[in-house]
Amino acid sequence: MSTSRTAPSLLDTLAVWLNTPVQAYEHWIRQQGLRGSSQRIYLAMFARFCQWLDEQSVPLDRCSSAHLAAFLAAENPNLPERRRHPQTGRQRQQYVRLLERVFAHLGTLGWVGSNPGRQAGVEGVGAGSDQPTRFLSAAEREAVIELVLSRLAALGPAPVDLEDWVGYRDLALIAATLGAGLKPGQLSSLSLNCIDLEQSVIDHSVAAHSHRAVLLPFAREALAAWVVMLKRLSEESVSITGRAGGTPAQWRRSQLVFVADRSGRGFGRFSLTQRMHVSSIFRRIQSFLEEAGVTGSRASPQTLRNTYAALLIEGGASTMELVTCLGLSTDMTAQRIRASWAAACSSRKGEPLGCSSD
């Protein structure tokens, strides 16, 4: 036990990082709570960057944003010639974020210098994403919210008929995406104890970083109705599921928020222990958006998440508040979203999200 506790401090020092950066990174990335596949991808990326620095005779602590830009413009000699194409926008952004995190960590170990990853983000080195950052227009946003509220009014804010559970659930999906910025994967794994309706917050924090999403008012109403329905299903579901939901305390701690439909055709049997699949969540959100008049590739959860961020910016949120509300690991993505939103505002005379002119 004592060895496992002391090993990290011996391997995670500034001297080790500067002398054997790949080995230091491999040890460090294992402590970040990531899946094994993600660890391998990031390790390969960092190793490739360190290889390039060695080829340029540039020590890690002398790396600058200019070096990172030159690296991203270079071909990877480790790949077959037919695959030595320029890196995609997503790959460039991943490298910039990776280096920002690395140098931020080195700063905690005593390294003094400007963070080349952070500076690269400011300079737009990682810009050029393969897909533009999309936002709902003002009319689209209002149409989506109006559809949520009108359907909630039709169902009733206080659920009565258990057969209406799918309707309440799907409204809550939209609420948690447009009104709290959650991704489909986060929605799929969300448990009830993450939701604090009194504080209007969804806390989806993990060990690596904080994620406390502020609920927008319309979202709170739809989520509150679904939570009431969930509890009723848990307490009275014998005729539908054949299984009770356990004691209130047990249910409160671990209950999945977005449970799956098991009827095969929808609107029928459900499981309190089976989560909705990410693809099902995507389809439900896409279908709802199309009904609200949002079509094509813009009818996606990512568009709603971007719009949530834009609404926070419109409300005066700082960059660090965006980082916390969106659950970002660094502020570079928040800066990119802020810049994209500002560009969207300036490019449309109609000001898509009520963008203020001051």
Image (tube, grey):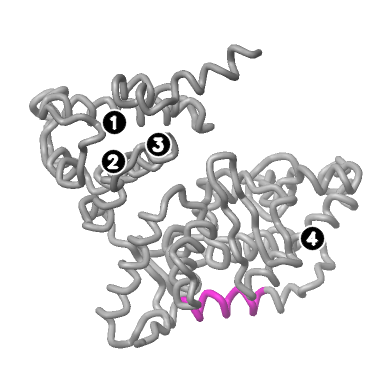
Task: Specify the label residue 45 is tagged with.
Answer: 1
**Residue contact between numbered discs 3 and 2, judged by CB atoms under 8 Å:** no
Residue range highlighted in magenta: 141-151
> Quick one: SS at disc 1?
helix
How far separated are the C-alphas under marks 3 and 2? 23 Å
Q: How many marks?
A: 4
Query: At label 4, which amino acid type do we have?
Result: Met
How far separated are the C-alphas under marks 4 and 1? 46 Å
Nearer to us of marks 3 and 2 is: 3
Judge whether 259 appears above or below 21 on screen.
below
First along the sequence among labels 3 and 1: 1
Percent x, y of residue 77: 11, 25
Percent x, y of residue 141: 48, 76
Most common SS among magenta residues:
helix
First along the sequence among labels 4 and 1: 1
Q: 215 or 136, which lies in front?
A: 215
> Quick one: SS at disc 3?
loop
Query: At label 1, which amino acid type do we have?
Result: Met
How far separated are the C-alphas under marks 3 and 1? 24 Å
Instruction: Return the residue at label 3.
Output: 110
**Residue contact between numbered discs 2 and 1, judged by CB atoms under 8 Å:** yes
Which residue is located at x 52 percent, y 16 percent?
7
Which residue is located at x 29 percent, y 21 percent?
19
Percent x, y of residue 106: 38, 36
Instruction: Return the residue at label 4.
Output: 229
First along the sequence among labels 2 and 4: 2
Query: At label 2, which amino acid type do we have?
Result: Tyr
Nearer to us of marks 3 and 1 is: 3
Nearer to us of marks 2 and 4 is: 2
Query: Which residue occupies the extreme left position in the image?
Result: 81
Instruction: Return the residue at label 2.
Output: 95
